[in-house]
Image (spheres, helix red, strand yellow):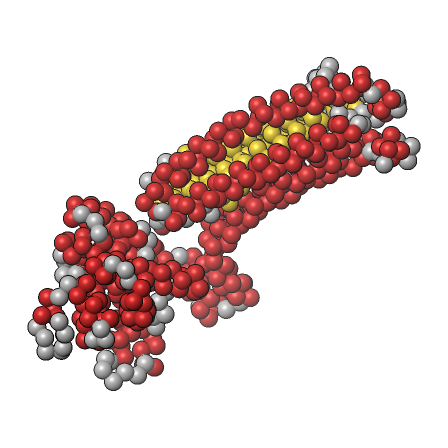
């Protein structure tokens, strides 16, 4: 059958019949395909781009591509999903190339006078553009699964049947998605309104501006106040950046401590076996931890891509993190015990490697204990040498070694003190690979206030994952009972102005985070000095066995 523009049957033709007519060269049949599916493709494109013009351009390109690829369509009756597949491929490529632009390029109302249009008044056109911006601001944070259903429903004359057919799902599934989508849309719209109104509230900057305009107060002090008002306006953003920097520095201090510990261990080693096992252990621990962090980041990426499954991915991540934090101290204690046994065994099997005075148990080069004491405890107690199986931990007001217990300060593989630094640190202020304390800083920070690459605490701030009882802020997962601010946030208040207000106090948080950054950097000082002292006391010499062998 040949279709023409005057053929009534063209409207009732099936997709397969229209494809056959197109392949026979009838362009009118393809026009009917475009009319049949243009609303579907434009709606799907809008759901992805948030821009009416861009969505229509993308849909148009998809139809043009479909015309050239029609000979490759093996199942003409599946024309609709085939067209949707072409469109989704183009949208995916555009997102990778340009990214998503939520601002949509709308002009502000003040620019209306500069817009020239023959059909629509300039002011009306600008208002329509801003309406599109507001619409997309509400829609963009609704997950794609629900957003597509919403857009199609209201563009398909509120027909659930049409939406179900377009998405190849049941009508009940469409109803569920619409119900969930409407609820999310209401939440996002409310958050948008709350945020917009909160930002319009006059504050200290307004007061300072008024004072600066008073002629009687036009003094240098007033000029300084005006500058202060501008600083207040930007304070919240600065606090967020400072918090992120604190998390990075806390994590970096844990990594630096681990690297410094490797250097100390090599200087303490006396046989090739000790050095080889030390290097192997350090590599396994370092890259194993790196792989673990990579897995957590992978779960973050998966949660963002499969938004409806974000709770599952977030739960898996938090369970894995808790398991790691619990297992780490036990594994570290066993590892230290192994190296103490190894030192004792090597001392028996290779006595020639330990003949030097500095390598004798309890030598002045291997350990320092101050004569001065307070309440029977040495003021300073530091072990520089690798301990034997029979040797216990070091204890002092200031303590350093593989296992260090300090009444004030301690550093080592395992460190316990009010201020502690180590691979596993416990104290009021604890900093390390895993820092557990009232304030816990490190690659893994655990405490009432926890800061690090991964943080667990009453309030948690992290670069990758934050688990907080009250509040959590992170660049990955943010899970809390009350408030969370993160790309993947789960809490009673998640990514709303109320959540941000509960998570951080811009006026106080910035100074606090700067303090923690300074502390994280300062903790590297005793570790660096300790490493230098170990090298000076126990490092290789011109006549040492290490140099003679190599």
Q: Nearer the viewer, residue 106 or 410?
A: 106
Could you tell me which residue is drawn at 75 percent across and 25 percent down?
Answer: 386
> Is residue 402 in view from this perspective?
yes
Q: Position of residue 503 (x, y in %)?
A: 42, 43
The C terminus lies in which quarter of the figure? top right
| Residue 475 located left or right of residue 169 | right
Relative height, residue 262 to residue 105 (above, below): above
Could you tell me which residue is drawn at 75 percent across and 27 percent down?
Answer: 274
Specify the farthest residue to the right.
543
Q: How many marks?
A: 0
Specify the farthest residue to the bottom.
118
Could you tell me which residue is drawn at 28 percent across and 51 percent down?
Answer: 145
Relative height, residue 20 to residue 123 (above, below): above
| Residue 61 located left or right of residue 267 | left
Q: Position of residue 367 (x, y in %)?
A: 79, 24
Q: Nearer the viewer, residue 219 or 244?
A: 244
Relative height, residue 279 to residue 202 (above, below): above
**Residue 515 in which image quadrant:** top right
Relative height, residue 331 to residue 236 (above, below): above
Q: Position of residue 88 (x, y in %)?
A: 33, 60
| Residue 378 located left or right of residue 320 | right
Could you tell me which residue is drawn at 43 percent across and 32 percent down?
Answer: 319
The N terminus lies in which quarter of the figure? bottom left
Q: Nearer the viewer, residue 394 or 423?
A: 423
């Amino acid at each position: 059958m040949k279709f023409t523009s005057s053929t009534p049957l063209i409207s009732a033709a099936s997709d397969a019949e229209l494809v056959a007519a197109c392949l026979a060269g009838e362009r009118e049949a393809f026009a009917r395909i475009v009319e049949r599916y243009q609303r579907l493709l434009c709606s799907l494109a809008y759901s992805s781009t948030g821009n009416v013009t861009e969505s229509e351009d993308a849909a148009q390109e998809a139809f043009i591509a479909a015309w050239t690829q029609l000979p490759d369509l093996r199942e003409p009756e599946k024309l609709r999903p085939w067209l949707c597949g072409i469109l989704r491929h183009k949208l995916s490529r555009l997102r990778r190339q340009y990214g998503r632009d939520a601002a949509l390029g709308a002009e502000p109302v003040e620019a209306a006078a500069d817009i020239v249009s023959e059909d629509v008044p300039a002011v009306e056109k600008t208002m329509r553009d801003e309406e599109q911006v507001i619409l997309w601001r509400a829609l963009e944070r609704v997950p794609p699964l629900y957003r597509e259903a919403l857009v199609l429903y209201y563009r398909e004359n509120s027909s659930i049947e049409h939406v179900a057919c377009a998405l190849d799902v049941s009508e009940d599934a469409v109803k569920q998605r619409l119900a969930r989508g409407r609820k999310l849309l209401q939440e996002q719209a409310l958050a948008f309104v709350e945020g917009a109104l909160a930002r319009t509230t006059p504050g200290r900057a307004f007061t300072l501006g008024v004072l600066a305009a008073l002629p009687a107060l036009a003094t240098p002090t007033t000029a300084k106040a005006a500058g202060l008002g501008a600083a207040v306006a930007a304070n919240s953003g600065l606090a967020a950046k400072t918090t992120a920097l604190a998390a990075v520095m806390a994590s970096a201090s844990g990594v630096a401590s681990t690297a410094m510990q490797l250097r100390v261990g090599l200087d303490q080693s006396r046989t090739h076996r000790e050095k080889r096992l030390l290097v192997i252990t350090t590599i396994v621990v370092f890259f194993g931890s790196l792989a673990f962090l990579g897995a957590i980041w992978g779960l973050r990426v998966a949660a963002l891509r499969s938004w409806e499954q974000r709770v599952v991915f977030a739960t898996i991540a938090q369970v894995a993190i808790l398991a790691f934090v619990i297992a780490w101290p036990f594994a570290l204690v066993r590892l230290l015990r192994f190296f103490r046994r190894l030192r004792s065994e090597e001392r028996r099997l290779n006595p020639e490697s330990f003949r030097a005075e500095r390598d004798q148990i309890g030598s002045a080069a291997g350990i320092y204990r101050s004569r001065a004491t307070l309440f029977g405890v040495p003021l300073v107690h530091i072990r520089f040498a690798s301990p034997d199986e029979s040797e216990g931990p070091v204890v002092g007001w200031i303590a350093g070694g593989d296992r260090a217990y300090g009444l004030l300060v301690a550093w080592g593989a395992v460190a316990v003190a009010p201020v502690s630094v180590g691979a596993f640190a416990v104290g009021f202020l604890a900093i390390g690979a895993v820092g557990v304390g009232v304030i816990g800083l490190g690659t893994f920070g655990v405490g009432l206030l926890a800061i690090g690459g991964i943080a667990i605490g009453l309030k948690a701030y992290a670069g990758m994952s934050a688990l907080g009882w009250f509040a959590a802020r992170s660049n990955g997962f943010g899970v809390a009972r009350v408030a969370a601010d993160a790309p993947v946030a789960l809490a009673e208040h998640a990514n709303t102005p109320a959540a941000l207000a509960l998570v951080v106090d811009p006026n106080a948080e910035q100074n606090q985070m700067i303090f923690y950054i300074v502390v994280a950097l300062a903790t590297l000082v005793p570790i660096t000095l300790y490493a230098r002292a170990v090298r000076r006391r126990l490092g290789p010499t011109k006549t040492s066995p290490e140099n003679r062998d190599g």
